[in-house]
Image (cartoon, rainbow, N blue to C red):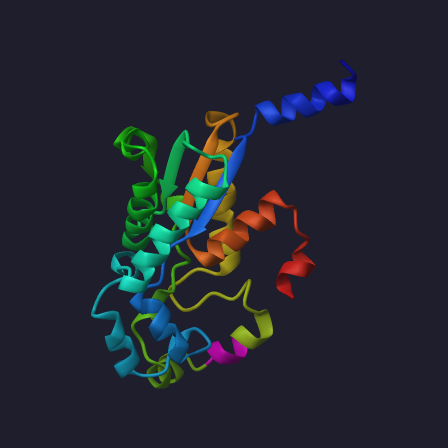
């Protein structure tokens, strides 16, 4: 065996074999997000669409449930992953429910609790006060924010009381480090959030920061 072949084999052995990423299904927050300026919802009426729920309790809509079942069937029918060694969700209601529905298409032993984990490092970016403060009020409470966001950009700016996307991606890096050796050679299913999936691509595909910013 050549030295280069040996090194490639060693690298394979210290990483999961496959990581399949799924974004959660459609939610009421996705509808509310259509009426947002920057990080803030446009009005209290839009915020009311969230039904008084914190981000981690936002449920799937019926459309989101159908999407989740469909992607479960897609994985079962088109891919060779007949069984995952471990399935992760973010601990948020919408990702846990998405995983429930995806796994309906898999054998019963795949749905056993021993093959499921919630991992808070892959939770959604924290929106801070942008979750519950409407746009007009935000301009009084945080008059500096809009100019700050324009200056710093969408990746590095932090909404008041929340996280930047870059902060959230650091958590993704911690997650990848935690599973790198613990799940070496295994097949992983990860149900998470759109921005967090971008973080997975940033780290796993080694995408340059300049490209991400654009």
**Looking at the picture, does residue 205 appear above or below residue 3?**
below
Q: Is residue 133 magenta?
A: no
The magenta region covers 144-148
Residue 179, percent from left and from top: 47, 32
- Residue positioned 38% across, 55% down in the render: 24
Q: Quadrant of residue 66?
A: bottom left
Residue 122 visible in rendering:
no
Magenta stretch: helix, strand or loop mostly? helix
Q: In the figure, is residue 8 to the left or right of 89?
A: right
**Looking at the picture, does residue 83 appear above or below residue 213?**
above
- Residue positioned 20% across, 69% down in the render: 52
**Looking at the picture, does residue 19 appear above or below residue 74?**
above
Residue 62, percent from left and from top: 27, 63
* Quarter placement of the C terminus: bottom right
Q: Is residue 145 magenta?
A: yes
**Looking at the picture, does residue 44 appear above or below residue 125?**
below
Residue 63, percent from left and from top: 32, 63
Residue 167, percent from left and from top: 49, 54
* Pick the front one: 150 or 80: 80
* Quarter placement of the N terminus: top right
Q: In the figure, is residue 8 to the left or right of 104?
A: right
* Pick the front one: 152 or 171: 171
């Amino acid at each position: 065996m050549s030295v280069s072949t040996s090194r490639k084999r060693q690298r394979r052995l210290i990483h999961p074999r496959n990581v399949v990423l799924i974004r959660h299904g459609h939610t009421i927050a996705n509808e509310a997000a259509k009426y947002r300026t920057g990080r803030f919802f446009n009005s209290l009426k839009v915020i009311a669409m969230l039904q008084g729920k914190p981000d981690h309790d936002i449920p799937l809509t019926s459309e989101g449930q159908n999407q989740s079942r469909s992607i479960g069937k897609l994985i079962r029918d088109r891919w060779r992953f007949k069984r995952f060694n471990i399935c992760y969700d973010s601990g948020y209601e919408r990702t846990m429910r998405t995983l429930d529905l995806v796994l309906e298409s898999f054998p019963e032993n795949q749905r056993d609790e021993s093959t499921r984990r919630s991992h808070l490092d892959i939770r959604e970016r924290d929106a801070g006060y942008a979750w519950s403060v409407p746009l007009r009020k935000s301009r009084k409470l945080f008059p500096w924010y809009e100019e700050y966001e324009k200056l710093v950009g969408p990746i590095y700016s932090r909404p008041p009381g929340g996280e930047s996307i870059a902060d959230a991606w650091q958590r993704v890096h911690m997650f990848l480090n935690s599973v790198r050796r613990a799940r070496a050679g295994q097949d992983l299913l990860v149900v998470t959030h759109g921005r967090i999936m971008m973080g997975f691509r940033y780290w796993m595909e080694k995408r340059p920061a300049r490209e991400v910013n654009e």
